[in-house]
Amino acid sequence: MHAAEGYHGINEAFRTSHFLQYGLLGTIAMIIILLQSPSVIRHAFYETFIHIHQLLAFLAILAVYVHANLGSLPQRPYIKWIIALWVTERSLRWMRLLYRNVSRHGITKVTVEALPAEACRVTFSIPRPWTFVPGSHAYVYLPVLSLWMSHPFSIAWSEERPAPYLSLENEKLPSTVSDLGSPLPDRTVTSMSLVISKRSGMTAKLYNKARASPTGVLTLTGFLEGPYGGLESLHSYGTALLFAGGVGITHQISHVRDLLAGHAARTVATRKIILVWSVRGTEQLEWVRPWMDDILAMPGRREVLKVLLFVTKPKSAREVKSASQTVLMFPGRANARVLVEKEYAQRVGAMCVTVCGPGAFADDVRAAVRSVEGGGVLDFVEESFTW
């Protein structure tokens, strides 16, 4: 009937029919989701993309539900199940987030330290125990900077320490010996640390706020959701060759620590660990210096670990100076093919090559692995995050 009346009839039908209006709304929302889905758009405008994407997804589901309900369509039960699954997933995530970060002893505290080369070392002190797995990542919530947005980051370091004295936990100085009380041995505080490089949006706000602090250190309230990932165990490999580009070191350093601890305890097969880290300048080495100092002090480190640092844009040749035979520095870019071929020829047992860094850097490492595979057990693992 409307088709016979032409465009005027179609316009009148959409103007008067809520059934058609909500169907059109759902269709438009899905089309816009499709148009903004290319990775170029997602990466260039991440925060804008995620806000719009979530709003459009909500509108699409709501519009389709109302459309089906008004028309008494047989698809209504399926849409209800979709809504129920979405609500359940969101509810479980929020419950887990609150459980991890809120307890009767307090909530998660965040310490932000401004670092050279426009980055921050961020440490979350979590009131509940958290089992850390090397190579895992978590979602960071910082309401003071981004009210309800979360951002994924690799967890570089984790420690368990006893809870502080009761008087210190209550943030007051003891006036008597009895006020001091005793340590709380049955409770521990879990600290999760990561490095956030300044980009735009939340990361820029975080760095600028920490840098503007008189001490360069900022204390906030935040939340950490996770952990996720950490599915690739390297324990069964005799040789582990780990490539990191820039802030990608946060993924690899946890594996190095785990393998060294396992080697000392004789619980892993690893006998050779080669960490290759490519940075633009020596300032970036400060990002993980305290953790690297701990690693270099671990038992058996000299027999197992070799660290190769490549500085692509040194300010002077004097900056590039090797500390020892096991910690070597080189100017220029890392030649992935040469490194992979050398270590593959000298491997002990099965070998694994992992990479975490920019796309072009990962492509070079992947191509290097493909060029030598076929003569023995050689696995490749790429860690990357993208929307």
Image (cartoon, helix red, strand yellow):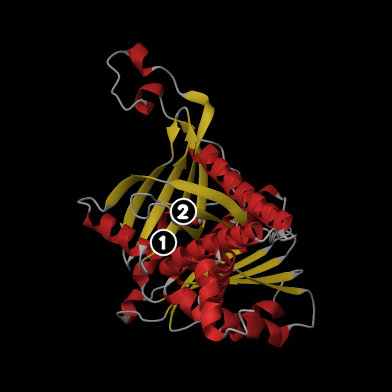
Query: Residues under labels 2 and 1: Cα distance?
Result: 11 Å
Query: How many numbered circles does the render carry?
Result: 2
Image: 311 above or below 6: above
Q: Nearer the viewer, residue 112 or 178?
A: 112
* Residue identified by numbered label 1: 196
Q: Nearer the viewer, mark 2 or mark 1?
A: 2
Question: Which corner quadrant of the image does residue 377 belong to?
Answer: bottom right
Q: Position of residue 341 (x, y in %)?
A: 66, 83
Q: Check disc 1: other Cα within 10 Å, few if <14, some if 14-19, many if 20+.
A: many
* Left or right position of 316 against 309: left
Amino acid on which the number 1 mark rests in the picture:
Ile
Quarter of the picture containing the N terminus is bottom right
Q: Residue furthest left?
A: 214
Residue sitting at 58 percent across and 49 percent down? Answer: 90
Q: Is residue 206 left or right of residue 52?
A: left
- Residue drawn at (44%, 56%), measured in percent from left and top? 149
